[in-house]
Structures are given as C-alpha cells and as structure tokens.
Image (cartoon, helix red, strand yellow):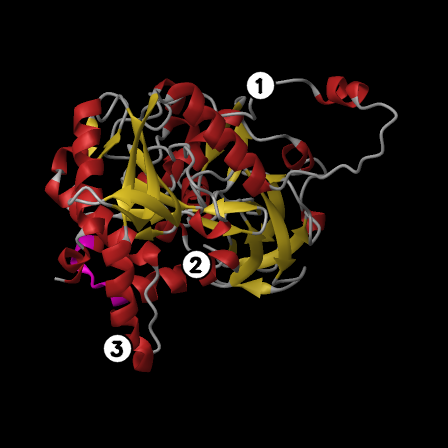
Amino acid sequence: MATEILMPALSPTMEEGKLAKWLVKEGDIVSSGDLLAEIETDKAMMEFEAVDEGVIGKLLVAEGAENVVVNTAIAILLEEKETLSEMTPTAFTTEAQDKPDPSTAVQASLSIVQPTPNVYVRKTRGRRVFATPLARRIAADKSIDLNTIVGTGPNGRIVKTDVMTVDTVPAVVASEAPSPTLATQTAAPTLAAGSSSDAVKIIYQGRDYSKVSLDGMRKTIAARLSESKQNIPHFYLRREVNIGALLSVRAVVNKDLAERNVKLSVNDFIIKACALSLQNVKSANVVWAGDHLLQFDASDIAVAVAIDGGLITPVLRNAEQKSLSALSREMKDLAVRARDKKLMPQEYQGGSLSISNLGMYGIDNFDAVINPPHAAILAVGAGKKKPVIKEDGEIGSATIMSVTLSVDHRAVDGALGALLLNDIVKNLENPFVLMV
C-alpha cells in the first residue's frame, strides 16, 4: 500500500522547515534508516531518515522549498512492484494539498524531544489517522478499522504493537480519547500582535526599502520571546561584581593552559559560578511546569550563542561537576556547531538558567528576556575600570562588571532570587572557589 512521507517535526519548536536537499530520487529503493533528505529546522540542519522500506514513487516538494509546514506530504513511498499508475487519481492529491491540522502541528512541536521518524497520515471519517506503513498493512490484513485504535507511538501514531493487540484489548474510538499532549496546552504561539503588514507599508509609502523575509528561526524567536514577555511575570535584580581577582587568576591559569591549547574566557568562570550557586541555592534550580515546579539535582546551564539570523542556547549539562577547562572546551565546541547549525535538539533543550553575555560588545548592562521554561536568565555586561572606595576609605579603581538576573516570579520569589544572585557574585569575586 502506498503511503505518504510527511514533513517531520525535528525540534520542539518546529512548525515548518526548509527541504534543503533530497538525498533520494524517484525510483530509488530505500530501507529503514536510509537518509531521505536534509531538512533545515528553526534551529539546525538535520538529516531525515526512512522508517520503512519501499520505493520512492514521487517527490511532492521541490528541493530548496522553504516554509514547508510540519505534517505536509513531501513524498510518496510505494511498495515493491507497486506503481503510481495503479493508484486511484485522487488517492493522494487531496491530502497532499490539505494543510495539516494546526493542533497536530502543535502536538508535534510540543511533544518531540528527540528527532523522530516519519509519521504517515491518512484522512479517515473526517479525522487524521496517524500510523506507520507496517501498522497499516497489518490492519488491512486483519480487516481492522484504524479509527478504533488509539496509537501509543510518538504523537499518538499507531504502531505495529497497537494493531497486533487489537484482538485482546477492547477497541477505543480515537476521537473520544483526549490528547495527553494537548490537554493542557493552548494553540501554537503566533508572532507578536502589532500593526498589520499593509498598515505598516502605508506608513512608509514613498520610501525606498527592501523586504526581508522571516526564516523559521526568526519566527520562532519572535513567537517564543513575545510569549515570554506576555505570560511570564519578570522581575529584575541587579548587582555589580568586582572581577579584579578573577581576571588575575584567569591570566595566571591561561599561561599554564597555553601548552594544552586551552584559553579560559570570563564567560567560563560565569558558567561555573552559576552552576555552583544553583547547588548552593537549590530552591532556585527549578523550571515552571504549569501547575507545579520541576526542581533539579544537577546544574544544567544554557548559554546564548549569536548565530546567523538569530540565537540559540546550547546547554552545558552537569556543569557543577566539570572543571573550567572542560567547560571551556565543551562551550567552544557547542558554539562552533551552533553557528554551523549542527546541534542536535538534545544539545539545546533543557537547563534551568540561561546566561546572555553582551560584554564583548561593550554593553554596560541590559535586561534579558527569560527563555521559557527557564526560571531565570543572567544578563552580563562589560567589565570596566571604575572608581571605588576601598576598605581603608581611600579612593581607588577596580574592574567592575554589571549583571542583571531576570527572574520568573511564578517560580522564584524576590528573596530567593536575591540569594541566588548574591551567591553568584560571591563565587565570581572569589575565583579560587571555582577552581576546586
């Protein structure tokens, strides 16, 4: 039986993607695990694998096509010796042109953590039935109506075991089964509300301009950060940090590490300081999960990396356990692969606290927007020489760095946030603590 290969959701926030390159052509025989295409998501370039064997009957989406919505049919997979001419003329035409059910796209974007294989879709009785090709063949052989089965595979798709056990498990009408993923979720976030495109164009009528289309990453950033500012009650805590001792220690350590081709940055010290502080102030090592908090044992720190067209936040896991040199090497590797769009979803998902450092651009201080579901983000400014009053009352100078902690008030109260920031500052001003 011919089946459709659909545009997969390869990241939690993916609603559409670019079919960058086909790795197969019509007539090719493919097996499970064979690479079908390279797909550019809102975060990275990823390879897309086949989950079943068959023959590529038709490529429905041209190479290089952008804004291909998740769950749109992109190709037709035939069984051996089956041809397109044997199919009814309308077998796939209507479905290929249908736009996916928005709720399905939301479910895919919210529930997938790892890259998932193809999900095959066919419309039955007015609703969309998701099933693997093998499950469909078994169902056809056993004369089983797929509408009577609730899938247990990713995103509720019907898999082999669901069909094989249908004789021993009472049938459940899928349309009556609530979606566990969507039960507590709202519709996918849209771009921030504002003036319509036509209204803006009228304002600038007569002025020369060029239109810059939004790619998937920019749309996702706009949607997520708009949602963050609208739905998360931010509050801000500010401190100044004397990083004189840190810079001195860094200079000495970097001399010793030079022969190992390792050079610590100030950001490496900040990562370690935050990781240790989350261990010292465990109640702040949380994320907001709707009707409860998730509190973590390990300190997983996300670090904002500027890339072409936007930014991404790779996560350093168990950062409290790693040395400064290990954190430095890992961060450099993640940053390089982030800029090449080679990160896997598990490398930029998770964490409870983010760090955004604009000090290298000369920014004194700023307020960062929380990256949900994180409970906080530390905005780091440049270290600059400033006059200070020393302990003996004399006026001197010191290198001062401004930091601002943006906090989700639902998850962390003001006093708790202050404890966390004070501990971070203490660690930065006593850098030998970070070397242990």
Identify the residue under disc 1.
193
Separation of disc 3 and disc 2 at Cα?
24 Å
Judging depth in this view, the residue of 297 and 387 nearest the camera is 387
Indicate left or right for 350 with 115 as reference: left
Number of the label disc, if any, that sits on residue 256: 3
Q: Is residue 79 above or below residue 7?
A: below
Indicate left or right for 24 with 207 as reference: left
Residue type beneath disc 3: Asp
Do callouts 1 and 3 mark residues in contact (Cβ within 8 Å)? no
Identify the residue under disc 2.
335
Q: Is residue 117 magenta?
A: no
- The image quarter containing residue 207 is top right
Count of labels in the image = 3
Q: Is residue 39 above or below residue 191?
A: below
Which residue: 34% across, 20% down? Answer: 233
Separation of disc 1 and disc 3 at Cα?
53 Å
Indicate left or right for 109 with 57 as reference: left
Bin the neighbour count of mark 3 within 10 Å (Cα to Cα): few under 14, some 14-19, many 20 and up. Answer: few
- The image quarter containing residue 173 is top left
